[in-house]
Image (spheres, rainbow, N blue to C red):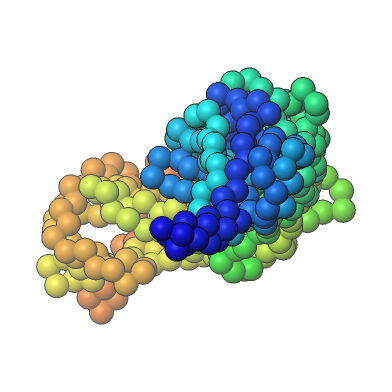
Amino acid sequence: MRKIRFLFYILFLLILPSIVCAKISITSEIKKEYTMGDTIGVSIKITPETTDSGLLSARLRCGGKEIQYYAKPINLEKGKEIKFSLPEIRAIYEGLCNILINIDSLYGENIDGIKTRDFLVTTKVNIDFEIDKKEIMPGEEFSITGSIKKGSNEKIEEKTAFIVFNQKKEELRIDSDGSFHKKIKVPEDIRSGSHTVRVIFEPWQDISYSKSKEIVIKPLAKRLESKINKNAFLPNEKLRLLENLYDQADEPMDGKVLVTLYRKSFFRKKTILNTKIPANKEFEYVIDASIKPGDYVLEGSYKKLKDKREIRINGLKDIDIRLENQNIIINNIGNLPYREKIRFLLEKDGKEIILTKRLSLDVGEDYIIDLSQELPTGNYKIKLPNNNTITNVYIEDKRSIPKKIFQGVVKITGNIVYGGGYLAKHPKLGVFIMVLVIIILFIYYGKGKIGKFIGPRGK
């Protein structure tokens, strides 16, 4: 019996040091709701009932997720309260959460434990801001004004956010009431078009909130470059022009470029072309035959930008010949007067007829040869001066009788030649002159004979 009591006494002495008693209570207020990234702080009071050592730990628990964020040995002294503030922890999990606080003995036995009230962690952060301009020119400033608040309209604890514009991140200072204001200067060489302005609030590491709005950067013309297909032209050739207009970022931009073509002169310049064309699109202009040969300036202008190109328009002596019904129409398509003699070769019934005309055409002037007033009736093959041949052309003779009488017809080795002079165009005058010549010749050569014939009778 004495032996049993002795064993119990020894066992009690061994167990006694391991029995440590202490009570934990929470002295700080835990809010009902936190926002992701907020810091959560807990203050506790420990009342030891024995003197010993233990391990104080704290865990954040949210749904099925749990993280131990504090663990530290603690010395307990009977009757001496310990007031202690745990390190703050960020709300990094979303959902219904609490914090569990434990004191364990050095042997791993739980001395006491307590958990905070449940609280909700949400992702509600309200970022709101306005931009004073919707369209901005390069080099100008715009202002951004707004506020950052939690979902419960509480003030945010952090005092700094960021603004991102044109791939540049700048600090955005937040006032005590959650408001902010900042001016931003637009770079001179920024790209035209839509750009994003983003306000970012990053309370902690990977936790980020943001809101974005768009602004439009209007293009500012910085460079004009003219390109032409060549530098010398003949009448009726195509001048191909490209007016390249570039903005502040040296990128093509839309716009209407004024194109002017004028002749170089020390005095008054003569404008040939004055029109607006779309930038960066090819424009075609046919060199008119009325433009005189010489040196010209092709100028493109857009607002204060100008670019000039010198071109030369060469002289061209040329005609266009075509047959319409019984008329041969000759047009001066060059930019020089055309004063030449031309010849048409016609063939009828195996006989060749050469029809010649002396032309005197100013630029753009027409001349019409009415074949019905030049040729007898019949089917003809006509060879034009440009070597084109037209067959089976029916001509109906509509010449007047005086013209038929006077029109020069000379048979030479089977050829008939028709002249195209002034008298041929005025046959009545020609007939009058012919008759007058015959009378003069008759009087001159028949004077003696007439005198002899009337002489005796007169006596």
Q: Nearer the viewer, residue 321 or 306?
A: 306
Q: Residue at x 13, y 60 (%)?
A: 392
Q: Nearer the viewer, residue 8 or 74?
A: 8
Report the quarter where the N terminus lies.
bottom left
- Residue 351, by quadrant, is bottom left
Q: Position of residue 310 (x, y in %)?
A: 72, 63
Q: Nearer the viewer, residue 390 or 182?
A: 182
In this rendering, does residue 431 appear at all?
Answer: no
How many tags in the picture?
0
In the displayed image of the protein, which residue is found farthest to the front? 1
Q: Position of residue 317 (x, y in %)?
A: 54, 65
In this rendering, does residue 98 appear at all?
Answer: yes
Residue 407 falls left or right of residue 66: left
Q: Position of residue 28 (x, y in %)?
A: 68, 29
Q: Nearer the viewer, residue 9 or 304?
A: 9
In the displayed image of the protein, which residue is found farthest to the bottom? 413
In the displayed image of the protein, which residue is found farthest to the right? 266
Q: Position of residue 410 (x, y in %)?
A: 31, 67
**Does 129 appear above or below 198?**
above
**Does 119 appear above or below 89?**
above
Residue 359 falls left or right of residue 139: left
Q: Residue at x 63, y 20 (%)?
A: 153
Q: Residue at x 75, y 25 (%)?
A: 179
**Does 14 appear above or below 305?**
below
Residue 453 falls left or right of residue 131: left
Q: Residue at x 58, y 54 (%)?
A: 16
